[in-house]
Image: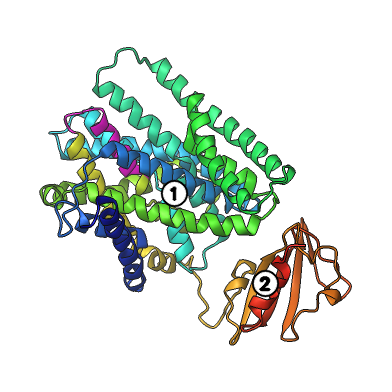
Amino acid sequence: MIDSFTLQALVISTLILFSILSSKLFFRFGFPILLIFLTFGMLAGSDGPGGIDFSDYSLAQSIGIFALIYILFLGGLESEWDSLKNFLAVGIRLSIIGTILTALILGVVIHYLFPVLGFMESFLLGSIVSATDAASVFNIFKTDSSDLPVHLKKIIEFESGSNDAVGVLLTTIFMNLLTADASFSGFQFFRFFVMQVLVGMMMGYSLGILILYLMNSVKLGYDGLYLVFITASVPFIYAVTTVFQGNGFLAVYIAGIIVGRNKFIHKKSIFRFLNGYVWILQIGMFLCFGLLVYPTRMANIWVPGLLIGVILILFARPAAVFISLFRVNLPIREKLFISWVGLRGASPIILATFPIAQGLVWGDLLFHIVFFVVLVSLLIQGSLIPKVAQWLGILKKDPDRKIYHPTDFDNIEFPGMTLQELIVPYNSSVVDKALFEIKLPEQSHILLIARGEQFLIPSGNTQVKGGDVVWVLAKDDVMPIIGRTFMAIA
């Protein structure tokens, strides 16, 4: 007899593994990977062949928020501030003005196309899908090898990482208006917006500085604790900022920018760990959202869902982009590309759970419409990004050119050999010994030593210190000997 935990573990792990393996096949045909996870979640749900009964919107909302804050933090870490700062004003315009205009334009169009939805319901729906999604945008730029202009990528990434605050604000406003909460005046809404943005920015900056200081100042006993520290810091930033009435999403993104633009201990290892961790969270989040959906209900709303999605892609988003970037010195083709890469994903789905949690009459209908709009956005916009970039003359590919970035160094294959990164324990027997004294096997060579903020090209007289990160290239059969030599306790 299989106990419930074992059965749940088997089902969940099988679903995740099957989704990952299948994504490799579907990605070759141009399908965004996150769309595949959503689809598998739908198939595994109570309305699909899988038959998994899951309808806990509050839990799904919590999972989505938890995953999204890590996605935003990692996006901030990898934002390359020097490339972004010259176009920060453009990103802010898109993030604030563009998001508000998208919600208002789409809300008006929805109301006149579907009069059954009142103005408030229409504006609420427009607000929910107004913000572009960081998870989808970051994922598209990571998995696609397209050679896009750096400034264009950074503008789009900054917009998607920072406009969640505006989307949350707009959704909150129209939800309160729908519930006839007379205690909220126009001034209070304005105050709420200012508090969300300003407190979010200040908390993100200050806590980012604090985390950076602690990472470089506190000497933790074990290297793995640095990974635990940075992992625990992300929900801490979000929670503290939210307690002080700021926008936690904006705070974690800014904190990521602050931390990422500076040097800190084990930076490479932390980046690698967070990349893998975020992938796990993204997969779990999109599978969970897929489980919430009833495909039979989608069959009843596919016409309005498709129409709203097309209007958002072809009219509301481009109009908002061109109005918000009026008199901004960017080529028209780049503005058109920014308009196209307004992907919707996790953020709108998370916001779509708010009306259900508040018990609004239209909550379930709005959720399924939003989900369908997200599917349309990922399927149409996400899969056509490279082709649109080529058509606009932005994407330039050279099939004969191969670029190896420093972060890809570990992935180069050496037949019969291994490139291994070793961290020398502080109590290792090799500490304070010169390399010639360690007597490593002949079929090995130490390529590089990282010590604090320095990189050393070693010679025989170079002394090994505790905490050094050593890159060793050696034959496969002697690598275990080298590992035991460096890890041996004095």
**Res. 201 image quadrant:** top right
Q: Residues within 10 Å of mark 2 (few under 14, many from 20)?
A: some
Quadrant containing the C terminus is bottom right
Residue drawn at the location 62% of the way across and 72% of the way down: 409
- Look at mark 2 in the image and give the residue it sits on: 483
Residue position for label 1: 134
Q: Identify the residue at image location x=52%, y=30%.
A: 241
Residue 136, can we see it? no
Which quadrant would residue 50 be assigned to in this image?
bottom left
Q: Main secondary structure of the magenta part?
A: helix
Of residues 379 and 148, the one drawn nearer to the viewer in this rendering: 379
Q: Are marks 1 and 2 in contact (CB under 8 Å)?
A: no
Residue 159 horizontal/vertical position (percent):
48, 45
- The picture places residue 21, in percent across and down from the top left corner, at 34, 70
Please name whichever residue, 227 or 62, is drawn nearer the observer in this view of the structure.
227
Discs 1/2, front: 2
Magenta range = 347-362
